[in-house]
Image (cartoon, rainbow, N blue to C red):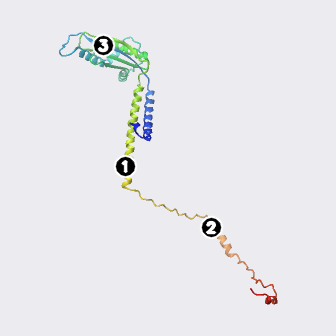
Amino acid sequence: MAFFLDSKKRRFYARITTVIFLVTLFFSIMLPLKYSATISVVVVSKGQIDLEQYQTSDVAENLARNLSEVVYTSSFFYKAMDTGYDISPTLFSKEENKRKKEWERAIKTKVVSKTGILKITAYDESSYTARELANAVAYALTLHGNEYTTLQNTEIKVIDEATVSKFPVKPNLILIGLLGIALGLAVSYTADVLLEDRRARAQLAKKEFPAKEKKKKVKVKEPEEKTVEQLLEKDIAEQAFEQAPEPVQAPQYSQYASYPKETLEVMPRE
């Protein structure tokens, strides 16, 4: 969507998306990396059942679903810990509620539809511990699975040995990165719509209520305040000027004053 926008909006979308992508990736990297180990068991019922009411595959699937819930119980937890696999007793908390949450995060079960196959996946920061956990759960099901079913002669067998991931699978960085990009695009689009709506409202308000021209205020310079010393100096200067004697004007002589009277009579007048 962003590629069909102008260059300015493309940069806007790209910046927000990049920031959100980096933030989500940073917080996901801060989480502990965990490996996975997956093992598969199959539930087979040898008891006599009414085939008109149930199909054999449906019965096996229901039994597998029941066992997938049994795995998370405290009773089954202790049975799995007593199987003899190399699992540290300090791996899980001693407090019941906290230990149950840790066990639910460490073990995941999945039933294959229309079959009695139950897949068990264990997660841990160590690939070795993850494999030991998966083997312990599968072995406990083969030993004690009949205790949790209503049908007699139910058999549980391991059909696939535990396979360990080569790389950490939790957190899923690829999925988190894609979610970060999607979230960034959604936030960018929302912000773009809100900004466009705000601009449109502002333009509409300008048309309906045009702004009045502001008159420029002429600043009048205020007379500078003079200090007492300056005022005294001014008064002294004015008094001295008033008391000063008037200058004596020199007598004005005519340009003919230095000539004798007889010469003046002879001289032509201009």
Q: Which of 260 and 186 is in front in this view?
A: 260
Residue 122 found in image quarter? top left
Structural distance between the alpha carbons of marks 2 and 3: 113 Å
Residue bearing the label numbered 1:
201
Relative image position of residue 54 (x, y in whole percent): 20, 16
Q: Nearer the viewer, residue 101 or 64?
A: 64
Residue bearing the label numbered 3:
42
Q: Do the residues labelled 1 and 3 touch (CB within 8 Å)?
A: no
Crowding around mark 1 (Cα neighbors within 10 Å: few <14, some 14 to 19, many 20+) is few
For badge 3, the amino acid type reads Val
Residue 63 found in image quarter? top left
Residue bearing the label numbered 2:
231
Could you tell me which secondary element the residue under label 3 belongs to? strand
User: Left or right: where does residue 146 sit relative to residue 171?
Assistant: left
Q: Residue at x 40, y 29 (%)?
A: 178
Crowding around mark 3 (Cα neighbors within 10 Å: few <14, some 14 to 19, many 20+) is many
Give the mark, 2 or 1, whose residue is nearer the N terminus. 1
Relative image position of residue 170 (x, y in whole percent): 41, 23
Q: Nearer the viewer, residue 103 or 179?
A: 179
Relative image position of residue 13 (x, y in whole percent): 42, 38
Q: Quadrant of the N terminus?
A: top left
Q: In which quarter of the image is the C terminus?
A: bottom right
Q: Do the residues labelled 2 and 3 touch (CB within 8 Å)?
A: no
Residue 231 found in image quarter? bottom right
Residue at the extreme left of the image, as rendered: 52
Crowding around mark 2 (Cα neighbors within 10 Å: few <14, some 14 to 19, many 20+) is few
Q: Can residue 159 be seen in this view?
A: yes
Structural distance between the alpha carbons of marks 2 and 1: 61 Å
